[in-house]
Image (cartoon, grey):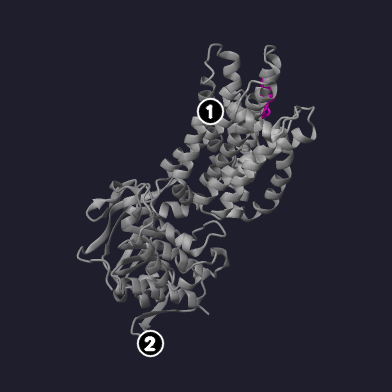
Amino acid sequence: MAGLVVLASAVVLTALWAMVVGTSDIGLPDVYRALFEFDGSRDHIVVTTVRLPRILAAILAGASLAVAGALMQAVTNNPLASPGLLGVNAGAAFAVVLALVFLDDLPARGYVWVAFAGAGVAGGLVYAIGSIGFGGATPLKLALAGAVFSAFVSAMTTSILIFDATTIDSIRLWSVGSLANRPMSNVLGVLPYIVTGLAAALLFSRQITTMSLGADVARTVGQNLALWRIVSGAIVALLAGSAVAMAGPIGFVGLVIPHMARMLAGSDYRRVIPVSALGGALLVLLGDNLLRAVFPERTIPVGITMAVLGAPFFVYLARNRLRGNN
Amino acid sequence: MREFDTDMEIALEARSVTAGYGQQAKVIEALCLGIKSGTFTVLAGPNGSGKSTLLKALAGFLPLTEGAVELQGAPVSSFSAKRLAQLVGILPQGPSAPEGLSVEDLVRQGRYPHRGLFSRWTPQDTHACRAALDLTGLADLAERPLDSLSGGQKQRAWIAMVLAQQTPVLLLDEPTTFLDIAHQVEILSLLRRLVKENGRTVVAVLHDINQAAQYADRLVLLKGGRVKAEGDTRSVVTGEAMDAVFGVRSQVITNPVDGTPLMLLESDL
């Protein structure tokens, strides 16, 4: 409980700091006035239409990707499972790009549903491919299936974006994971889905804990595994799809944070899920704003920052945690 | 304290059951067996004789090709997974759980079938877990992570989880394999106490015929997916039966310690 308070305070403090980071020099008192005594000045407009949505997007994307990763690791009993590595993000992004190019008159909120479908289909496909052959969906087979699927689908996404001359730069940036220039409407559009997904994950956290203990425990105590795998899969598609529709495929949050959450909170998902949500929000918020603070003139997509931070952790994980599992 | 009624004479019944896996569709074939309530029954037989398959079929874990397994007069396939887990507890062979999980956390999982979707932890849940930990002698180790326990303690922790389910019937697949002799005896006397003191029905797959004769009430010998002999341990443990089922020559004498049958192998030296 104390840990949750500390994490939540860290998120709030980082969000306050992120409010004053940027090319315009705006202090905290101005941020306060912009939020509560809005006067239409340029600074106030920057705060409410540029910085606030970006910060909210970082918090929501981080929380949903981390919780989606925690659920995936629980369902598959696989320390490498995450929306990034198992192709769920890539699938959602590919679906959104297909819809952008081929469905001209899709209303803005339709893209979220396209992303859900892409995330769900990708997750199901990778799980099916990874389960073929002896031993079912072992960590290694699942990770390989995810890597191959991600590489293929990301290549398709990139080639569509390259050959489609009408694609604007912001979409190119989005396709590697970016929080820049998200309009508030965009953020508020996915908010209900993310809140629903996070609430469902918390509500079912006891069932998720039982699932995470492996098929031996789950079957012995009479858990309907097929049902709970589908429920968890739907929550993952909802969370990862929303995050991707809003901020593109940001990797590694969903892999790194659930591990740290289990190190801090143990194996009970009633604690792992809230810690993951706050931890994911904090990591993406920090990652996005550290770069903005250091290189104020450049726009470096947060997806790239996460890859740089996440790759060494991935190596650590592969060398240490996986050894005991194979 | 007897917690379970044993007025139903047959707790679990296999009616000409044929079952297997994929390519090997007939690991057990047309097998008929009644498990008597309030007894400790041991399943024994050579490797590949279908002991584990029969246990899984009895637990309703295996789709049957033919026949039916009946629990309380209804086929097990008609029960939901949750309802079945309130009536039959099964311990798989060599179960695994994530390292770092504490004994208590594992045992608490045994309450899963008794809890509703959003229901809270109740005093009955606490009571059941405490009783399971006491019966298995693990009360002092409740906080310890599983991977810090010895093989025997770990096996008892798993049994405690199944006991927390408070099922009248317990099925255990090779609960003593890989344990040293002291831990084997510990598990076997626990199973016997569960039958004699709590009135549970226990079915276990064991390899040691003499242990079965000492601790169990009934013995079922399987070979090639069929029942070769079944009955009181005294009537089943005979030299002819051992030869027919295992193909080993032996003499059976009366154990001078407790009067149970004792099988002595004839060496070919």
Q: In this view, does B185 lie to the left or right of A84?
A: left
Between circles 1 and 2, the one closer to the viewer is: 1
In this view, the residue in front, B125 or B180, is B125
Q: Mark 1 lies on which chain?
A: A
**Residue type of the residue flagged with mark 2:** Val
Contact flag, marks 1 and 2 (Cβ < 8 Å): no
Q: Mark 2 points at which residue?
A: B257
Q: Name the residue under label 1.
A: A190
Expressed as whole percent of the image width and height from the top left, the position of residue A240 reads 56, 33
Query: Quick check: is A64 in the magenta stretch?
Result: no
Q: Is residue B245 depicted above or below B50 in this figure? A: below
Q: Residues within 10 Å of mark 1 (few under 14, many from 20)?
A: many
Main SS category, magenta section = loop
**Label 1: which secondary element:** helix
Q: Which of B84 and A206 is in front in this view?
A: A206
Q: Position of residue A207 (x, y in %)?
A: 44, 48
Q: Which residue is drawn at 39% across and 72% down?
A: B135
> Label 2 neighbourhood size at 10 Å, few (<14), some (14-19), many (20+)?
few
Quarter of the view holding residue A168: top right
Query: Magenta segment, which residues?
Result: A171-181
Q: Which chain carries label 2?
A: B
Q: Is residue B239 visible?
A: no
Give the amino acid type for the residue marked by disc 1 in the picture.
Val
Q: Residue shown at 54%/18% (left/top)?
A: A108
At 37% across and 71% down in the image, what residue appears? B191
